[in-house]
Image (cartoon, rainbow, N blue to C red):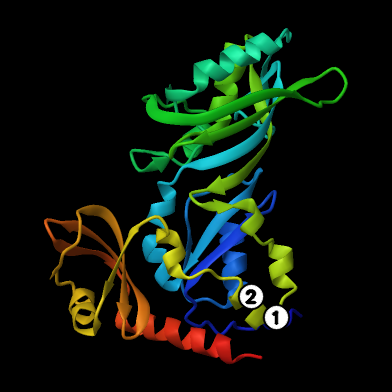
Amino acid sequence: MNAPRTRVQRRPVHGVLLLDKPLGLSSNQALQKAKWLLRAEKAGHTGTLDPLATGVLPLCFGAATKFSQLHLDADKTYVATARLGVKTATGDAEGDVIAERPVHVTPQDLARAEAQFTGPIRQVPPMHSALKKDGKALYEYAREGIEVERAPRAVVIHRLKLADTAAPEGQFAIKIEASVSKGTYIRTLGEDIGEALGCGAHLTSLRRTATGGFVEAQCITLEALEAMDEEERLAQLLPAEALVDGHSRVTLGAEDAARFLSGLRRRGAWADASEVAVFGTEPAAFLGTAHVTAGELIPGRLLNPIEIQQILLNAQQTEATP
């Protein structure tokens, strides 16, 4: 007879956890594990990583989920390994081999490919992706053996470095280091580079090393998080305002802050700005985002007073913990 499952008592948790996503878990599986460990009421991630990918995955809890879209749109950096001479149905090691070709690649070929794929390019999204067609994810069509026409999408490869790397005897592989705009598929980039080299390719490993201003050195693994007690886990969270670190900053007094939180515009001697992080002074707290046009501070995504009180209370409790 199975023992009854212990019900987890959820609680309001607010902030950002920088997770080093492990190999083999989907982003949602990693999120649910972290949510359970923190006993958080509400959680979301800032864009998915494939199960075969590892690395930087910012997880948002509570009030921070309101700003997760900002990192969906952020530039990202990846390190990948591509095996040359072998194409697969999925563009990675999970797919069936669909073509094999001899490999004759020189350093000059790699340099030409670097130049070809650096800057603005167009990519055809892979069938094995979460993009939707008529309300259905492309990977669902792919599982049914259906090929759906996909329009090329404009993306930007800000930096690209290609180099030979170690591979098992009889195989050839390259290391791909790429900093890219949102919407870039690294599997597709690897496949396209393989075609440009005349031999085809598929990814055998993929790691995200940075997203926005967050880097892998800041991340924690699920194993390390699991080994901590609850207070130590909470201490790993960055505040919600970490997601708006690059925004202009505006600070409001108590009266203006209260009106701003109710959705009212405020007037002041502020320069026009499309991305503004707004803070209050009494109490000192992050209030939300806005933009400034012609001296008007126009509210965007806002915290509510209960969330602000919970964040301040959690901060006080953390400071009081010896």
Q: Quadrant of the N terminus?
A: bottom right
Closer to the camera, 103 or 88? 103
Q: Residues within 10 Å of mark 1 (few under 14, many from 20)?
A: few
Residue 16 rendering spot, x and y as whole percentages:
51, 66
Q: Which residue is label 1 attached to?
A: 229
Q: Is residue 103 left or right of residue 121?
A: right
* Above or below, comparing residue 15 to residue 244 in the picture: below
Q: Is residue 154 left or right of residue 27?
A: left
Contact between labelled residues 2 and 1, with CB atoms less than 8 Å apart = yes
Q: Which residue is label 2 attached to?
A: 233
Give the Cα separation between the discs numbered 1 and 2.
6 Å
Tag count in the figure? 2
Q: Is residue 225 left or right of residue 68?
A: right
Which amino acid does the dot numbered 2 rest on? Arg
Residue 147 rendering spot, x and y as whole percentages:
46, 25
Residue 109 rendering spot, x and y as whole percentages:
64, 10
Residue 149, located in which quarter of the rendered image? top left
